[in-house]
Amino acid sequence: MNKISQLISLLGGTGAVAKELKIQPSAISNWKKLNKIPSSKHKAILELGSFLNINIENFLPAKKLRDFKFKILLIISGGVASYKSLEIIRLIKKTNINLDVVMTKSAQRFITPLLVTSLTEKKCYVDLFSVEDETKMNHISLARSPDIILVAPATANIMAKLANGLADDLASTILLASFSKIILAPSMNPVMWNNLATQENYKKLKDRGIKFIEPDTGDMACGESGAGRLPEPKLIVESILSDINKDQTLASQFKNVSILITAGPTIENIDPVRFVSNRSSGKQGFEIASELTKRGGKVTLITGPVNIPFPACENIIQVNTAHEMLDSVYKQLPADILICNAAVADWKLVPKTSSNKNFDLNNKIKKTNSSLLFETIKNPDILATIAKGNLRPKIVIGFSAETNNLKKNAYSKLISKNVDLIVANNVSNNKVFGEDYNKVCLIEKNNCEEWETQSKKSVAFNLVNKINNLLNNYNQRGINAK
């Protein structure tokens, strides 16, 4: 059986594929006979494979370099291997990738900006304090415009700067000011690479979601041997193109899927200057919204008051109270997926005097000698209200912040609120709210997954993979029911 015949079989057979693609079965039979799928149908086949949760990339020819339309910023830091970056430039220039280059001062000791410019046919950026460049705020535009920032070679010094938030030149400033995917290709002496400080920086950066193209092992220019050699330029470029391929495949994973996400805290006013809230920063919900947007989802983010940058999703709605959040969710229904990540205030507090007299809540409550009492009024349970309602989305996911009996309490919420998945975490140590790391437990009716501590960006990436599986299973049940 040839590769295309195997692929059609995996996708359900000639008739099923023809029906899904709305073409004649004879066309599918011809593909099998020729062992080739027309390039015009590659995207449809990839989407069908993604829908059925089948990885079919190996059955299709690799995309040609000229098909890519990405922007890459190459940062060349100082080291003997800097000369290899010239070959990286030459290989990238063979594609239609838009390439800009930044050099550190140390890199200029090994190769010159003029040499780089002659290869790229564009300006090579070298100085943070250039009057000409900074009238255009180039350090910001260079940070924001690329899809990928590649640092090759990446020295121990630039790794340390990035890991510890230092920004004392153009390259390090760009890295700290960017939302782009960052990839480091380290190159240094083997002892430097294995030094505890470098390895701690390496782990710290990986935990933050920064990717590494691991150094090779071999003889070094200094005469020593070990891990630390910059990989061959061809391997680096192939790795980058492989990432672009994966990103392009993921970019349509949630195409035409409408997603509602609640995030951040809600606040309940006591009087015009006081309110009740909680420590939620919104970071985890924002990372989930960002990841789903990258994968093509139509994301509406409904957020309480936060102090972090908004993700670039389709629609952002800002609210304050639990009732405002619930109303906003209702107005956005129907939707395919609901993710309730917000830490909604459970109660409103209504102040009264010891004699049970109500205050005028339009004015600030003044200090008095008498005691101040509060009556609690329960806020709506947004998750349960929507999950049990007539407009329930296909997939409903809740979050559960617990201080004890994590799995038991999370499972109880899963059942009582009629949701598909609960993402639970232990907040008793106060090391979750506002932090960049999270340790979560995924609770389903018949399954429990405990994840190791990882960055909230990584939690979002892995959770979206899980959501994709849930949605595929839901859709597959619908197909089987028909």
Image (tube, rainbow, N blue to C red):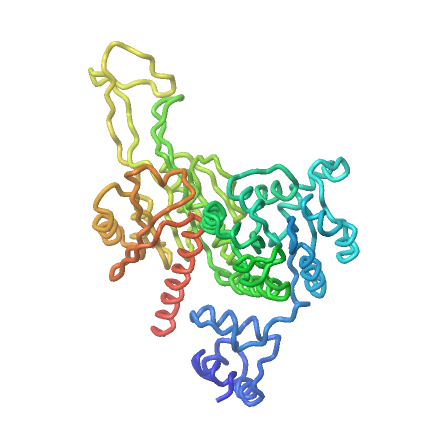
Q: Quadrant of the C terminus?
A: bottom left
Q: Where is residue 377? Give x, y as percent.
A: 26, 32
Give above or below for 152 relative to 11.
above
Give above or below for 356 relative to 472.
above
Residue located at (66% from left, 61% from top): 69
Give above or below for 17 relative to 374.
below
Residue located at (28% from left, 55% from top): 443
292 on left or right of 381 = right
Q: Quadrant of residue 52?
A: bottom left
Q: Where is residue 374? Give x, y as percent.
A: 25, 24
Note whether residue 141 is visible.
yes
Give above or below for 103 relative to 12.
above
Q: Where is residue 134? Give x, y as percent.
A: 72, 37
Residue located at (31% from left, 55% from top): 421
Q: Nearer the viewer, residue 429 or 78?
A: 78
Note whether residue 287 is visible.
no
Residue located at (37% from left, 59% from top): 394
139 on left or right of 447 = right
